[in-house]
Structures are given as structure tokens and as C-alpha cells.
Amino acid sequence: MFTSPYADVEIPDVTIYEYLFGRLGGEDLDRIALVDGTSGAEMSYGQLVGRIDATAGWLASHGAGRGTTVGLFCPNVPAFAVVFHGVLRAGAAVTTVNALFTADEVGSQLSDAGASWLFTISPFLERAEAAAQAAGIPAERLVVLDGGEPAAAAGHPSLADVLEAALPAPTLSVDPHAAAVVPYSSGTSGTPKGVLLSQYNLVANVAQSRAFFRVTSDDVLLAVLPFFHAYGLTVLLNLALGERARLVTMPKFDLAEFLRITQDHRCTYLFIAPPIAVALAKHPLVDQFDLSSVRAVLSGAAPLDGELGHAVAKRLGCTMLQGYGMTELSPVSHAIPRDGAERVPLDSVGYTVPNTECKLLDPATDEEIEIPAEGPSAPGQLLVRGPQVMLGYLNRPDATAATIDPDGFLRTGDIATVTADGVVTIVDRLKELIKYKGYQIAPAELEALLLTHPLIADAAVIGIHADDGEEVPKAFVVRQAGAELGDGDVLEFVAGRVAPFKRVRSVEFVDVIPKSASGKILRRELRARA
Ligand code: AYL
């Protein structure tokens, strides 16, 4: 077992609202919390909290509270923070939905999570309405944040309606240990599942990662990583709000716009995933902007190549950091600390965050691996225990039991090494998960979809590395006897039914999918073949 080399931090037993805004006052009320990077519209901390309270009051007056789950299907805009915290303040739970999802994918998540409300923006209305219908959510419970005439005519309230009602936040006691946020993740196997995070999990993870990332009230953060994902939610949104920093939101990534916003808003801290690091290191466009305000860049959600990280640091003249974790860990368990970053290799994920214990298990035997006095340990599956570990998966006791052991250690499905001074390096992935640009793709989800094709007898999906280094899904397909089915048919079939980032990129027809005696797909054999 190994622990964080850092002293434990205090984790107050309070709601995330109390933790982040309980002591807000004085000059901070007028400080800018959020800026819409597209329109330039600003929201102060005082306005943010006022709107959160009004949203909570409005929801409560409409019967939403403890036991209610609200879907939030929205890209990064300042109002995301209002709805997210408003829902939790009302004692309800929020399930955050990927903005790239198809209507069917949104509908499935809302149904699985038991959501009875949905908040969205008008450009997403068509998908949101179809999803709400599939999940049995009536028009008056589908709130369109920027709703105009057409939304109102269809019976949808808008955020303006909510705020104009100006109802006080309900006085109720919310249990910080109850499930409050339900993002979806496939974890170490199978299809996406609702990850039950408590408000305490969120408070803990902000408290644990503060000292590592050292965001201050002087920082201006570029918020392009999605708030609906645990990285954007905890490390970017909540951490920054707690420090009274300024967040400049971008609803979707576009390199030129990313660079323009960084320059025009004098952003000091960029939160990215590795594909953006590639652009920052190599793209000629970067030279056309003044990025001198940038002091630190944090990459996470997928492995960062050390040389690439150094190239970014050199080109921007800033400190480069890397974070590691999992949605199931709220999400941070490891990171390179901003103070002393240069002492830690950039292809490592740094140290274990405070209040956290880890162990490495031999992947073949599950025996605990010894840590040598010199050099890195043998590779083993990383297990993590701490206050950031999820409560479990929604309605999936089997998957919960397979993921969290009886001692409370969560199996990450990642293979790591550790040195005696506690530097952890992720060296491989044991689990099925495919990571494309930091987004999760669950092979089991694509396999289940392929099996619904009438001409497909069997199928398996694995991740392969594309020419640009990204991991992409490749499908092995067994045709039905005598069926005529080409690559293009398979690619098109999947593309028509999933979010663009989940698309299968290559197909190989085979006679049989290799399986174990118990029927498990032998992915290693397929990987060897690919
Ligand atoms: P999920 N290096 C290698 N693999 C990583 C890394 C990394 N730095 N970060 C995440 N992964 C992989 O739930 C790993 O396989 O959360 C892990 O199990 O979408 C899986 O992605 C989890 O994927 C931050 C920033 C934590 C981000 C995160 C993790 C959010 C990803 C701390 O500072």
C-alpha cells in the first residue's frame, strides 16, 4: 500500500453549495465568476449565487427536491453553473449528459437515471424534446435556458421565467452523503452506468486537489473541457468557483476560437485533454496569437506524451501539469503538483492526492506488488481508496461489487508503476474502455448495437491507434450465413446511431469472434491480430 506524500486536508461535512459559496461576501460578490467566451456576457459571483438560489426556489415550488433527478443537457455556458448548483441546492440530483449525444442516447440516459426534468439550450431542443418524450418528461418540465418564442409556444419554461419568479431557496437540510450527481461511465467493463457521486465526494475532491493545482482569484481559466464530465465539473468549474477565479466558457472546441479567447481574455490557466496539447505544440496558428498570459496548462483524461507536454511548455513558456483519475473518483486521484512540477516526469501522473491510499495488484494473481527502494515497481492494477470514491453504480450492485472491494478500494482497470517517493506512472490499460479525445467509448455498447443489425451474427470492438495517435474503435464482424455486407455498411450503420466520437473507424470481417469458455470476448487475441 502507498499513500499520498502530502498531509491530509480537512474535508468539511457540508454541501457543495455551503463549501463553495457559504462564506461568499464583500468584494467577492462583484468579482466576475463566469464569462461567456462567445458573447462576452459576464456573471458576477453575487449574480451567480442569486440565480442558483432562485433556481432552487423555483424547482422546489414545482415539486422538485429530494428524490428528484434532473437531466442537464448543455454545453459549457455560464448558465450551466446556475442549473447545476440550483438543482443540488433544491436537494435534487443532477445527471449530466454529453452534449454530443444523439436523441436516443440522451433518452436512454434520462430513462436509466429516472430523470423527471430536463434543462437544455435552444440549439439542442430537437434532440432534447425527442429524449424527453422517450423518458416521459412533459413539456413543462423541459426548461430551455435561453428559450425564446418557439420554446415558450411549445410549453417550455426558460431560465428567464425561473429567475423572474425570484423565489427564495428552500430551507431544507440536504444530506451531503446522499447521491447527488450522476454522470455516466462504463468503468472497467460493460456499458455506461450511472456513477453515484455525493456532494461530499465533490467537496472532498475539490479540497484534495486545491493544493495541487493552485488556482487563485487572479486566475482566468479557459473552460472548454465539458462541465458535464467529471474533469470539467470538479477540476475546472467547482475548483475555480471555490477559489473565486474567473472562468471563460467555450461551448465547443475550435482551435482558432480557443486561441482568440485565450489572448483576448488574458487567460492564465488552460485545462485541456491531450489532443489540444498536440495542437498547442504543433499547429502554426498558435504563433498568430499572443498567449503570453498563460502560466499553466493542465492535461488530463487520457495519457499525455511527455515530449509533447514539454513541447507545449516550451512554446507557451508555461508550467505543464498532468492529472489522472476516473469519473468514479470524482475524478482526481493523482496529479503533478504545480509547485515543484519540474521535479516530476511529465509522462507520469505525479503523486497521490491527499487523504488517499493506493495499492498495485499483479494483474495475473491479484497479489499486492512490493515497492522497491530504488526505481519503479513492477506494473500492477491501480486501486484507490479515499473520500472521492463514488457511492456505487446506480441500480447495478453487481458492477459496484466488481469495482469496489470490501475494504473500499476502487479498481481503476489501469496498470501503473510507482516509485518509493510516490511518483505514479500509468503504463497500460487493463479494462475494455477506449478513450477518444478524452471521451469514453464503451466497446460493449458498440457490440450490442452491432448485434442489432440483421446481417451481423456476432461482433467485437477493440481500440486501435490511428495515424494521429488517437485511439479509435475497430469492429470485428461475423456476417450472417450468406449475407452481403461490406465495411461501408457497418460504418454507416453505427454512424447513424451514435454520437460522432463513438463512430467505428475500421471493420474487419472474421469467421468467428474468439471467446473464452464462459463466453467472454478474448480482446487480447483481437488486439494481437490488429
Ligand atoms: P474518465 N493518463 C492516462 N490515462 C488516463 C489519464 C491520464 N492522465 N486520465 C484518465 N485516464 C484514463 O472516467 C484512464 O484509463 O475520467 C482512466 O481510468 O472519463 C480513464 O481515463 C477514466 O476516464 C484531472 C483531469 C482526472 C482528468 C481526470 C480524469 C477524468 C477522466 C484528473 O486533473
Image: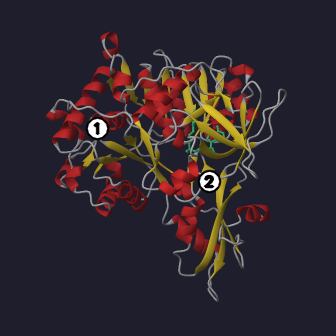
Between the residue at mark 1 and the residue at mark 2, the CA separation in whole angstroms equals: 33 Å
Find residue 77 and report its horizontal and vertical position in percent: 38, 36
Q: Which residue is identified by label 1? A: 91
* Ligand 1 quadrant assignment: top right
Residue toward you, 126 or 464 = 464
Quarter occupied by residue 318? top right
166 lies left or right of 327: left
252 lies left or right of 277: left
Find residue 521 and report its horizontal and vertical position in percent: 67, 67
Residue 54 higher or lower than 526, as above or below: above
Residue toward you, 141 or 500 = 141
95 lies left or right of 441: left
Residue toward you, 2 or 511 = 2
Q: Which residue is identified by label 2? A: 433
Q: Helix or strand or loop: what does disc 1 sit on?
A: loop
Whether residue 288 is visible, yes or no, is yes
Residue 370 higher or lower than 115, as above or below: above
Going by the numbered disc 1, the residue's amino acid type is Gly
Residue toward you, 306 or 368 = 368
Find residue 365 and report its horizontal and vertical position in percent: 75, 51
Residue at 77% across, 42% down: 379
Whether residue 249 is visible, yes or no, is no
Find residue 529 and report its horizontal and vertical position in percent: 78, 65
Question: Around disc 2, counting alpha carbons within 10 Å, would you say few (fewer than 14), some (14 to 19), or many (20 or more)?
Answer: many
Q: Helix or strand or loop: what does disc 2 sit on?
A: loop
Residue 360 higher or lower than 190, as above or below: above
Question: Around disc 1, counting alpha carbons within 10 Å, would you say few (fewer than 14), some (14 to 19), or many (20 or more)?
Answer: many
Residue at 70% across, 71% down: 515
* Residue 416 badge: none
Residue 393 higher or lower than 218, as above or below: below
Going by the numbered disc 2, the residue's amino acid type is Leu
In the image, is the residue at mark 2 within 8 Å of ligand 1 by its beta carbon? yes
